[in-house]
Amino acid sequence: MDDVKIGEILLPGDDEEQEGQRQRVRKRFWPVLKRAIRQIPFSRDLVAAYFCALDPRTPARVRGILLAALAYFVLPIDGIPDFLAVVGFSDDIAVLTAAFAAIRGHIREDHYESADRAMMDGLQDTV
């Protein structure tokens, strides 16, 4: 994926667009994560980003970037179909890595603590 496309994907969007992305992410995040957890090398960071994106204390721009990246992650159709072994999530990883770089420092320790609890409680059978 080139930088231009990733930059377009990570646009924070307006309030209405962010709300739509928030709803899509909340609905599809956990099922997609359970399928992808073995292929995503930074699952804990991904789950912490989920909690950061849904945290009302997170600045709107940061929340928008994370919601855009997470929405791309949960979309059934993207640059490389996720059902392809090994390479299926590579475009998702590229987008998520760019998002993490753009919002560096905004994912707080309490987001990681929530991620740890969620991963221990809900994902034990998939990890």
Image (cartoon, rainbow, N blue to C red):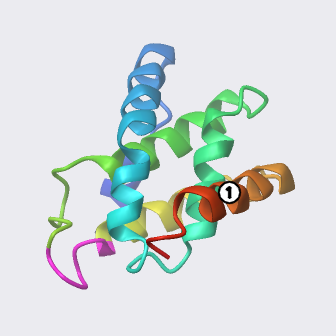
> In the rendered view, would you say 114 is above or below 17?
below
Answer yes or no: is residue 101 visible.
no
The location of residue 55, given as percent across then percent down, is 70, 33
Q: Which residues are magenta?
A: 84-90
Camera-side residue: 19 or 2? 19
User: Circle 1 sits on which residue?
Assistant: 115
Q: Quadrant of residue 112?
A: bottom right
Mark 1: amino acid? Ala
Confirm whether the magenta stretch covers residue 61.
no
Q: Residue furthest bottom?
A: 86
The location of residue 124, given as percent across then percent down, is 54, 69
Camera-side residue: 87 or 100? 87
Q: Residue at x 40, y 30 (%)?
A: 21
Q: Residues within 10 Å of mark 1 (few under 14, many from 20)?
A: many
Q: Residue at x 38, y 79 (%)?
A: 39
> In the rendered view, would you say 7 is above or below 68?
below
Q: Quadrant of residue 117?
A: bottom right
> In the rendered view, would you say 57 is above or below 78?
above
Answer yes or no: is residue 47 visible.
yes
Q: Residue at x 51, y 16 (%)?
A: 15
* In this picture, residue 76 sits left or right of residue 17: left
Q: Residue at x 26, y 47 (%)?
A: 75
